Amino acid sequence: MARKSKAAIAAQTAITATIEDAPTLHRNMQQVVNTIDQLFGEAQVASVTAFWRIGQQLHAVGQNPDQYLTEEQQSAQVDPVALLISLFSNVYSTEQLRAAEAFFEKYPTERELNRLVALRCPDRPSWRMTTSHIQLLTQVADDDQRAALEEKCVDEALTAKSLATELTEMRG
């Protein structure tokens, strides 16, 4: 296996440097970096919000099946949420949709949603809670334990993979 040249290592290091670690950029480049970071942040907030709203819709259908099912479906005791999930099965997995529903059930108000998407690590301001983090957090039944994990995610800027490892260790 060929060794990388010092120039290649330096270039890779420069490319992989985080926004916080790159204070010597030209001001025009820093402006582009800031804009891209802002756009990624907006996309992440939109993704998490959409995930929550999908869960909200699934929850509403599950709570009021008479409003969403035909008389024939009601007589056959069709589960309205299962029906919706089957309609989207070619695009989204059952696990994804059930996770969206669990997200809404664990964080049922817009205030809680907004708090979650506003979380930032003080040492890494571009870090954000992702949909992957949320899918993992909603697996934690205990509210206090989940809140402690949220705090750990924020304090340590945990990746979703690191959070998954944390959950595996907690479960034994």
Image (cartoon, rainbow, N blue to C red):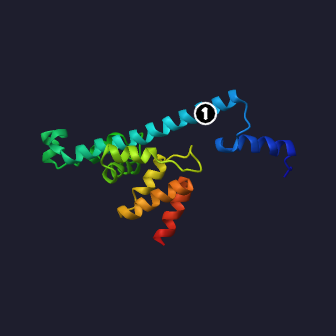
Q: Amino acid at mark 1?
A: Asn
Viewer can see residue 166? yes
Measuring from the top left, give residue 125's x and y in whole percent: 56, 45
* Above or below, 63 relative to 46: below
Secondary structure category for the residue under label 1: helix
Residue found at the far top of this picture: 28
**Is residue 104 shown left or right of residue 79?**
right
- Position of 59 relative to 30 (above/below): below
Residue 43 higher or lower than 106, as above or below: above
Q: Residue at x 23, y 43 (%)?
A: 61
What percent of the width, then of the height, locates residue 142?
36, 64
Dot 1 corresponds to which residue? 34
Instruction: Name the residue: 43% across, 42% down.
Output: 48
Q: Residue at x 48, y 69 (%)?
A: 170
Q: Can residue 141 be spotted in the picture?
A: no
Q: Nearer the viewer, residue 117 or 96?
A: 117
Q: How many marks?
A: 1
Measured as percent of width and height from the top left, residue 27 is found at 69, 29
**Relative side of 146 to 63, left or right:** right
Relative to 70, 28 lies left or right: right
Q: Nearer the viewer, residue 171 or 7?
A: 7
Q: Quadrant of residue 24?
A: top right
- The furthest residue to the bottom: 172
Can you give x and y, in whole percent of width and height, for residue 138 in the image?
Answer: 39, 56
54 lies left or right of 29: left
- Residue density around tag 1, few if under 14, some if 14–19, many if 20 or more, within 10 Å: some
